[in-house]
Amino acid sequence: MVKQNTMKVAIATAFPVDPARPRGGVEAVSVNLVRALARFDDLDVHVITTDTACASPSQSTWEGATLHRLPRRGRKVLADATGPGRQTVTEFIVGLQPDVVHAHDVYGLMVKGLALPRVFTVHGFIHEDTRLAGERFAALRARIWKRVEIAGWADQPHIISISPYVRERLAPLVPGVIHDIDNPIDAGCFDVSPNRTRKVVFSAALINHRKNTLGLIEAFGRYIAAGGDAELRLAGPVAEEDYGRRVSALISEMKIGDRVTQLGSIPAAQVRQELAAASVFALVSFEEGAPMGVAEAMAAGVPIVTSNRCGMPYMVRHGETGFLVDPNDPQDVARHLGELLDDAGRVEAMGCEARRVAMERFHPDVVARRTREVYRRAVARR
């Protein structure tokens, strides 16, 4: 049923077929934000997403929002976002006649130039991710992505920055208004009750170069070699096959196969079970905007060991909610893992403070209220 006297919001974003199993941070953010926004009586929320498995446009409802799934024609992300995908999404939004459009990630390129009030959430820097992927022609592809991204940012009247790190990068390049709003996480993360019966380091991330899985494994191996006693549990699919083989080789080389468990891709409910048992959440990526895994672990009351670069220092307070470490220094990572794993009292204290901070910043209701205010400003400005 369509809500009366409401603001019609079109959210163009990646949205999973199964909302219980989002693939990656953008899909997880979309699920959490849409669910929270749809609870407002004064918003009529429509989600527009593209899908290669979709043969024709379809419409359904979920949690009070209307989902529009459109066929995705292009196989390459950049070509699709600036070509057939852009045409498909733009034409559909124009026909939908929303009061405001909220695009996420690459969908911001698809709505470029659209003559409607627009908001664009920048989740990170695709050109940096491309550069760090280490694939063939990565440097050239990164330069192309950078040029396209900058042009897309400059066209947006309102930009939501998920981290001061993102704001710092965008501010010199964009004329639009920048709003600082953290990513929302699943409210269920705040209901996790710690159940620590053993020492566990948990990490939820793709297994690839950018996430620096090898660096985490080496650090954990050094902790074990120095006499430590713990288990490392890795959730997330292998995103780069060669890198995955190197991960297996390092585990074998360090003789920690009996202490490392690779869980693969797991649903959100299982992630929360892992967080309940974890003493530490670790993510030592080379590049991140505002990783969902860190926010979810904080909400669950788990202290963090994460990189001292990019967006992570704006999420974790060193010595209060976790530790910031050098991702290029496995010994530094190992030392701080040990400081938590070998001190249950510190784990408890830091975990409690992490949960308090997360409630103020990452709860979906908090994020939805702030996002709704940006919508109102965008519409009023028009």
Image (cartoon, rainbow, N blue to C red):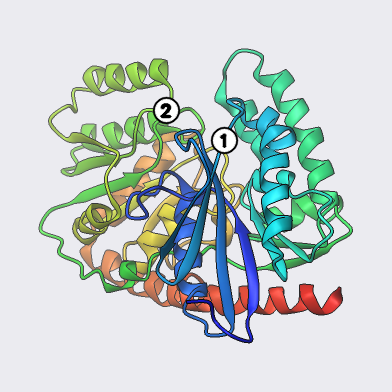
In depth, the one of 37 and 192 nearer the eye is 37
Residue hosting label 1: 72
Residue at position x 12%, y 30% in the image: 258
Q: Is residue 377 above or below residue 83?
A: below
Q: Is residue 7 left or right of residue 263?
A: right
**Residue type at numbered disc 1:** Arg
Q: Is residue 353 above or below residue 207?
A: below
Labelled disc at residue 239: 2
> Which percent across, then down, holds residue 98?
69, 67
Residue at position x 52%, y 78% in the image: 366
Labelled disc at residue 15: none
Quarter of the image for residue 333 reads: top left
Give the number of callouts: 2
Residue at position x 51%, y 40% in the image: 56
In depth, the one of 224 and 190 nearer the eye is 190
In depth, the one of 221 and 214 nearer the eye is 214
- Label 1 residue SS: loop
- How far apart are the two marked residues, 1 and 2, measured between alpha carbons? 22 Å
Q: Is residue 354 left or right of residue 127?
A: left
- Label 2 residue SS: loop
